Image: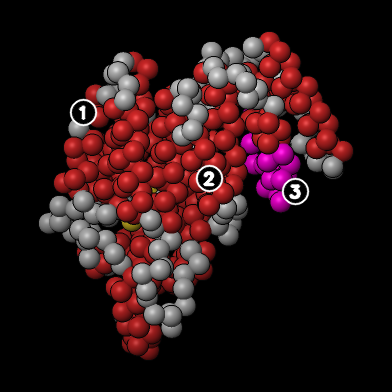
Amino acid sequence: MLPSSLKLSRVATATVARTARLGLTSFKLTSSSPYRLIHDGIIKSPNANPVALQMIDYALSLAKSQKTDESHAQAMLVLEQCLSSQSSENQDVVTHNSKGMVLLAMSSLLSARGSYDDAMEKLQNIQDLIPSHLDVRVAAMEALVGLNLEMGNDDTSSVLADKCLELIGKVNSDDGSEVASARAKAIKGLAELVQGNLESAEPFFQGFLDNKGCIGNAALSYGEFLHATRNFSLAKDFYQKVIQEVAKKKDFTDVRALSACNMASEEVLLAATCALGQLEVHMGNFGNAEETLTSALNRAEQLFGSRHPKVGVVLTCLALMFQHKAKQEHSSSLLIQEGLYRRAIELLKAPPLDLEVNRTMRSRMDIIALARGGYAETLCIQENRKGEGEKMKRWAEAAWRNRSLSLSEALKISDSSNRMPVLDARICRAL
């Protein structure tokens, strides 16, 4: 282990020097920088090479602090150097865990730039690291399912979720696999929720209420299931639990909390905040809803920039909130609603209205349909814009694919309905 650590340390030192020569001097190695601790042994784990963890932290911090093409390229270089420096001769768990964690980090950077195919290739490669910890492979499979759900590949997502469950079935149930087991069940449950299969999803969430392994993504997906089935009080408890727990964690400090791509902790925190805001709307607490959704909007813009599709998801939630509030309070906020819907539709990169809906349109289509459906309602109540609204409504209804709710049902809050729509900001889908 010592020679491998020394080799990685030398590579790390050379790599950071190279990034400095290439002009990335604004990223300073201060006392708060995780890279400064590379020789200090502060971050320790029996499951991975500590130097590899430091290089991962450095690369992710570099990419996120500057958010430029150059910083992204240099972050990928750091991770590629880290990966290539892992001994191919060592077949021990620590080496394979380290490789898996590097690949998870690389997939996160790639997916953040929209390179989903490349990200999924890195995640698939982790499945070949058989000696690696179960949680590493489950994190990779979870992210694969998440990316496919976001892309609208629901059948593929379901198959991958089944494979994730198979991974769990191959190990004995013990404390070490409790978190991984909950995550595997939850990602399968989420895949069923996306397709509107509430009854099929329910068995995968059984026992989650008192399950200590129900944290992070698993807890959020369970909260969304509770929310969708109108168990508002318990759903709120789980959303708040996720927000409190995830805010304290880093993705690569605990092998059991590993996550990547749209399942990474920062995206879980955003999605939980967004879901909590929607829940407040459904409970009629519009003041709390606006405050919470505004917090989610700020978080989305900080994470992704102001023009990212996930900002459009949160804006859709805000527009729906103002629409529901106006209906319930018999007030008018048409200008606010219209502005939010137009901006959301733009950021979601919606196809032109003149383009006929077809089955090749998958990514974010249910959110786009919901945004256009809500926008159509604001237009239809204006006599001089009713024709425009009707056209938009027809397009939205054709694009809506949820099996358990019609678009009109999703756009209204009914006390008689046993099903509530929930927008999942992780995967940009309506559940």
Disc number placed over residue 121 in the picture, else none: 2
Sequence order check: which comes first, mark 2 or mark 3?
A: 3
Depicted 115 relative to depicted 266: above or below: below
Region rendered in magenta: 57-77
What quarter of the picture does the N terminus occupy?
top right
Few, some or many residues within 10 Å of mark 3 (<14, 14–19, 20+)? some
Give the mark nearest the N terminus, 1 or 2: 2
Asked if the residues shown at circle 1 and circle 2 are in contact, with their CB atoms under 8 angstroms apart, the answer is no
The answer, for residue 115, to whether it is visible in the render is yes
Q: Which residue is mark 3?
A: 70
* Discs 1/2, front: 2
Q: CA distance from mark 1 to mark 2?
A: 33 Å
Look at the picture and state if 45 lies above or below 182: above
| Position of residue 398 measured from the top left corner of the image (x, y, whole percent) | 30, 74
The kind of secondary structure the magenta stretch mainly shows is helix
Q: Is residue 331 left or right of residue 37?
A: left
The residue located at (37%, 74%) in the rendering is: 358
The image quadrant of residue 141 is top left
Q: Which three-letter amino acid code belongs to the residue tagged 3? A: Glu
Q: Is residue 37 left or right of residue 195?
A: right
At mark 1, the secondary structure is loop
